[in-house]
Image (cartoon, grey):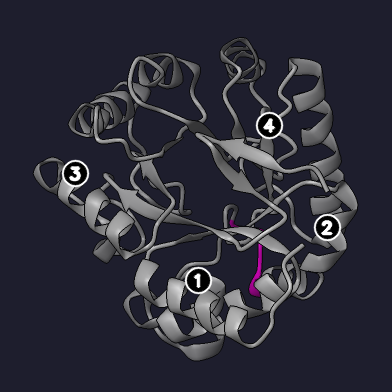
């Protein structure tokens, strides 16, 4: 399997890398993840202290039904957050799919782009290729998360890898896109994707596990986002067994404990 290096952090071929989520969008489906500007650096440093390797900063909620904000508002939010983190020494991911936002973000300390559009926008691909910046690329045909089942996810990941190759992007992690990104997506599709996660090793790329507190978990437990930690850890355990190389989570201490216990049990990482 090819590995991906993000600011000297090797993803793949060892223990899963932990990515902490900081949302600067008050519209986020999980209100507990929202962090105002004045607390962003404190929160990021605390997450690193707890075991996060990378911090993912996102200024827009992409959950169905969320308030839609303009590109200008996303850009303003993200740049304000990045300014507070400049010089911190923290490895930073920016969660955006808009070229104008990305161009401005790259004037700050940014080490990886979390593109949920999977390079569907050629301009994003061009910018990333020119700057030689690694990516986390989600399974997408045309619009973020537009895969309705496992077969469509595989086809989308094939498309994404081809886009990366054409753009000269050699360092990237693949995100299978677990979650209800479009209204047509149902929980069964997410559970199937998690069950068959190991089959995605055919791409020979590091894989992202991004299930933290998502709605498909609530379809089984009947719990809201604030009470989905146990379900999140249960699914994450299975995904680590299935080869996840990076875990994106709201809950760094608990997820770090999970990894430590699996290691003590003799978990072997691909």
Instruction: Name the residue beneath numbered marker 3.
Output: 41
Instruction: Name the residue beneath numbered marker 4.
Output: 171
Q: Which mark is residue 200?
A: 2
- Which label's residue is closer to the chain start, 2 or 1? 2
Give left or right: position of 20 versus 199.
left
- Which label's residue is closer to the chain start, 1 or 3? 3
Q: Which mark is residue 215?
A: 1
Span highlighted in magenta in the image: 183-187
Name which residue lies at 40% across and 57% down. 52
Name which residue lies at 48% across and 67% down. 212
- Residue 44 image point, x, y percent: 26, 49
Measure how far apart labels 1 and 3 are at the Cα level: 28 Å
Q: Which circle, 2 or 1, is nearer the viewer? A: 2
User: Is residue 99 magenta-colored?
Assistant: no
- Residue 142 image point, x, y percent: 70, 34
Measure how far apart labels 3 and 4 are at the Cα level: 27 Å
Look at the magenta stretch and give its main secondary structure: loop
Q: Secondary structure at mark 1?
A: helix
């Amino acid at each position: 399997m090819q590995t991906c290096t993000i600011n000297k952090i090797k993803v793949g071929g060892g223990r899963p890398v932990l990515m902490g989520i900081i949302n600067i969008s008050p519209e986020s489906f999980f209100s507990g993840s929202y962090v105002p500007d004045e607390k962003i650096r404190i929160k990021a440093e605390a997450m690193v202290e707890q075991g996060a390797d990378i911090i993912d900063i996102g200024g827009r909620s992409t959950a169905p039904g969320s308030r839609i904000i303009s590109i200008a508002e996303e850009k303003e939010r993200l740049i304000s957050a990045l300014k507070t983190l400049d010089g911190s020494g923290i490895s930073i991911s920016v969660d955006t799919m808009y070229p104008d936002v990305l161009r401005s973000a790259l004037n700050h300390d940014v080490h990886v782009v979390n593109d949920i559009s999977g390079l569907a926008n050629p301009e994003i691909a061009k910018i990333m290729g020119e700057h030689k910046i690694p990516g986390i690329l989600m399974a997408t045909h045309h619009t973020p998360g537009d895969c309705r089942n496992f077969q469509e996810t595989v086809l989308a990941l094939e498309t994404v890898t081809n886009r990366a190759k054409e753009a000269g992007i050699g360092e990237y992690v693949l995100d299978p896109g677990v979650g209800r990104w479009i209204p047509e997506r149902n929980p069964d599709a997410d559970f199937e994707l998690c069950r068959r996660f190991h089959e995605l090793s055919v791409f020979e790329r590091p894989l992202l596990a991004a299930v933290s507190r998502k709605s498909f978990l609530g379809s089984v437990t009947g719990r809201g986002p604030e009470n989905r930690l146990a379900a999140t850890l249960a699914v994450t355990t299975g995904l680590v067994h299935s080869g996840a190389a990076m875990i994106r989570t709201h809950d760094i201490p608990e997820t770090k404990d999970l990894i430590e216990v699996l290691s003590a049990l003799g978990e072997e990482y691909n």
